[in-house]
């Protein structure tokens, strides 16, 4: 795991967008795993801007999102399909047929989970998985006690997650209590992982995820086991990390980061 600290949320997000854009240019048929949430909105704005100004080509990409609420139709304003269309897909030249999210309206949720795993395998696996982190330390909706080798499945959401997301709904009581999520094991199968975390409210959980013990209580700690995971944070999110000076040294001295200086 590499941790890169940038001065503020804008520069951290800009760096993450540049890393993703580089990977798309290196492999136009990239299989890209995507996340949602407030942090990702800024990231997708950067990618849309890069598409418009620098001709970043999304036409051959295949995407897989981490999760989707159970019981929300795709056109619901709080569904993650709607989120992705609104923040990214509608603004770039991606083939919408190659964008994949779990079907939260499926008649057989268990079968849908198996189907989603098979779709990922049929594409040769995810090349680059983009991640955020929830306040409970989850990646995707892998809430506390998620098994490290779990696969795509239905998951009950914690009160913390519900409290965090319910205000986004016009009526907070409409917030679903369950979601389909890629499993921790599914995420770890990705060839590369890129986590973006900003804001002081994430400082405690990112310190536990990066520097704490690996535990099923904080699913993001599983990324410590991944052979190629980069974590990009701003100074606010990095405030509780113990090895900040080493992480800064990495960005300033490692050859792979020189093009981003």
Image (cartoon, rainbow, N blue to C red):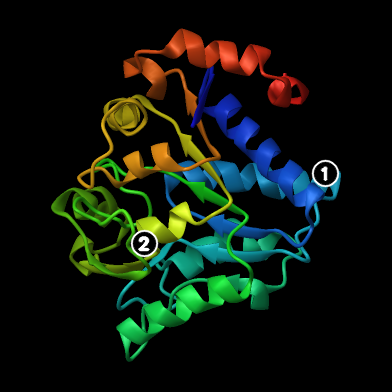
Q: How many marks?
A: 2
Question: Who is closer to the viewer here, 251 or 82?
Answer: 251
- Helix, strand or loop at label 2? It is loop
Label 1 belongs to which residue?
A: 53
Residue at left offset 64%, top offset 31%: 15
Residue under the image location 32 percent in, 62 percent down = 150
Figure check: 241 above or below 187: above
Q: Using residue 127 as the reference point, say whether residue 136 is left or right of it.
A: left
Secondary structure state at the residue bearing disc 1: helix
- Lateral position of residue 73 relative to residue 89, left or right: left
- Position of 125 with respect to 1 (left or right) is right
Asked whether 226 or 136 is in front, the reply is: 226
* Residue 82: mark: none
Mark number, residue 183:
2
Q: Nearer the viewer, residue 165 or 95?
A: 95
Can you say whether 121 is above or below 256 in the image? below
How far apart in space, not on screen, are marks 2 and 1 (Cα)?
36 Å
- Could you tell me which residue is drawn at 55 percent across and 65 percent down? 64
Residue 49 seen in the figure: no
Tell me which corner region of the image, top left, top right, bottom left or bottom right, holds residue 155. Answer: bottom left
Name the quadrant of the C terminus: top right
In this rendering, the answer to whether 81 lies above or below 222 is: below
């Amino acid at each position: 795991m590499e941790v890169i600290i940038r001065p503020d949320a804008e520069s951290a997000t800009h760096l993450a967008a540049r890393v993703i854009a580089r990977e798309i240019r290196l492999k136009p048929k990239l299989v890209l795993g995507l996340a949602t949430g407030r942090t990702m909105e800024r990231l997708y704005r950067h990618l849309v801007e890069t598409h418009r100004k620098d001709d970043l080509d999304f036409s051959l990409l295949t995407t897989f999102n981490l999760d989707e609420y159970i019981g929300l139709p795709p056109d619901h304003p709080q569904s993650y399909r709607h989120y992705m269309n609104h923040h990214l897909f509608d603004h770039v030249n991606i083939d919408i047929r190659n964008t994949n999210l779990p079907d939260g309206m499926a008649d057989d949720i268990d079968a849908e989970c198996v189907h989603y795993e098979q779709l990922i395998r049929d594409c040769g696996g995810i090349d680059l998985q983009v991640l955020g982190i929830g306040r409970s330390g989850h990646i995707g909706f892998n809430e506390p006690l998620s098994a490290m080798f779990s696969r795509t499945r239905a998951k009950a959401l914690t009160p913390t997650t519900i409290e965090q997301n319910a205000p986004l709904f016009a009526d907070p009581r409409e917030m679903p209590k369950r979601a389909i999520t890629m499993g921790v094991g599914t995420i770890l199968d990705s060839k590369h992982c890129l986590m973006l975390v900003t804001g002081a409210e994430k400082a405690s959980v990112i310190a536990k995820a990066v520097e704490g013990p690996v535990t099923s209580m904080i699913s993001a700690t599983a990324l410590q086991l991944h052979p190629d995971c980069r974590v990009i944070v701003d100074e606010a999110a990095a405030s509780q990390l113990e090895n900040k000076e080493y992480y800064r040294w990495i960005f300033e001295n490692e050859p792979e980061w020189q093009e981003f200086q």
